[in-house]
Image (cartoon, grey):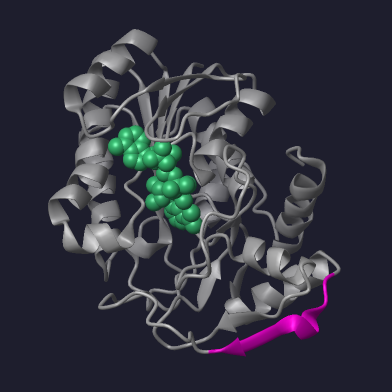
Amino acid sequence: MRAVVTGGTGFVGSNIVKVFGDRHGVPVVVPTNSFVPTDDSYEHAPLDMTDAAAVMSFMEAHTPSVIVHSAILNDFSLISVDRRAGWAGYVGATRNVVQAANAVGAKVILVSTDWVFDGTQAGADESTPPNPVNIYGVLKLASELVVTEGAANGAVARIAGVNGVHWARHHTPRSQDPGFGYFASWIVEALRAGKPFRVWEADDINMVATTSLASESAEMMWRIADRDLTGIFHCVGGESVTRRELALRTAAAFDLDPSLLEFGPPTIDVMPGAVVPYDTTLDASATAAALDYSLPSLAEQLRKFRTQIEEGVLA
Ligand SMILES: NC(=O)c1ccc[n+]([C@@H]2O[C@H](COP(=O)([O-])OP(=O)(O)OC[C@H]3O[C@@H](n4cnc5c(N)ncnc54)[C@H](OP(=O)(O)O)[C@@H]3O)[C@@H](O)[C@H]2O)c1
């Protein structure tokens, strides 16, 4: 196997690079955008994913057998106001990847999201028809369709409530938002510093989700590649929790003081004008069976996350 991991300098992508490269010994090439990595354990070269000819030349030069496509234009405000930029950064980039993958005979695995569902579809499984309620969900669903309809050998790996270490940039990349990504990192960072942390609770944000540890999701993607599977997969953990439960269980797993946690509605308008899905619980039993994988409990995810933070290695 030879892999190209787009977005490999991002949060989720850096976990895919680590699992494919460090754990499974797969040679990995990462196209870079604005951030240039200092890690020389993998090859990297500049590439704008929205440039079709450049993506084709890149894949022809590196001849991957699998392309894991995690790069996105990760700016909700921008994609809300500039629909062309949003379309190019998600759907256009995915089309470029699929066309290049088909040309070089590579498999494509698109990293997608539970936000393709509307927040009332709790327990959505791999075959549940999606119903996105905001521009991010629409762009991700359109990207999924590019892969499922256009790739000669394509898979969609939906992830959700993603926690974990960012291996490429050693910082927590953003503050609390209405989703579940990075949630455990915010709790750990604040409580370790002895600062109070207000866990948002409100009817108009993502209140229930099926958590994932980024490296576990990456392991599931590696299995999709290794077994050469196609279709839609839910690469998540085996438990769904509320924000409150996740906060309390994170504090316990890291031996931190839960009395520093406060609960209440956001004090700012968190996603002006956007609808946010409330309950994005996923059922991943078909994926677990296809990958012969035991979905990790939240306790297991938090234990591995702690090891990753404290020892700097994949657990
Ligand atoms: N994080 C979550 O909680 C979560 C949950 C569900 C699904 N996902 C999915 O996981 C994937 C990765 O998300 P993430 O949170 O890891 O995002 P991220 O940390 O913001 O990473 C995005 C990556 O894409 C790269 N990129 C952006 N525009 C590019 C371009 N035009 N050409 C080449 N590379 C470009 C970025 O490079 P630069 O930084 O250098 O621009 C960065 O490496 C996405 O597909 C997302 O939908 C994430």
Please state which of residues 51 and 302 is positioned toward the viewer in this rendering.
51
Rendered-image quarter of ligand 1: top left
Quarter that holds the C terminus: top right
Q: Residue at x 56, y 31 (%)?
A: 17
The one of 287 and 313 positioned closer to us in this rendering: 313
Q: Is residue 32 left or right of residue 102?
A: right
Q: From what the image shows, is residue 174 above or below residue 256?
A: above
Q: Is residue 197 above or below residue 129?
A: below
Most extreme residue toward the right is 255
Please say whether residue 70 is visible from this viewpoint: no
Q: Could you tell me which residue is drawn at 58 percent across and 39 percent down? A: 15
Q: Which residues are magenta?
A: 256-264
Front residue (pair 30, 111) = 30
Residue 313 sits in quarter: top right
Q: Is residue 270 magenta?
A: no
Q: Position of residue 287 (x, y in %)?
A: 51, 48
Can residue 276 be seen here? The reply is yes
Residue at (32%, 17%) from the top-left corner? 59
Check if residue 257 falls in the magenta segment: yes
- Residue 31, relative to residue 117: is it above or below? above
Image position, residue 260 (x, y; %): 75, 82
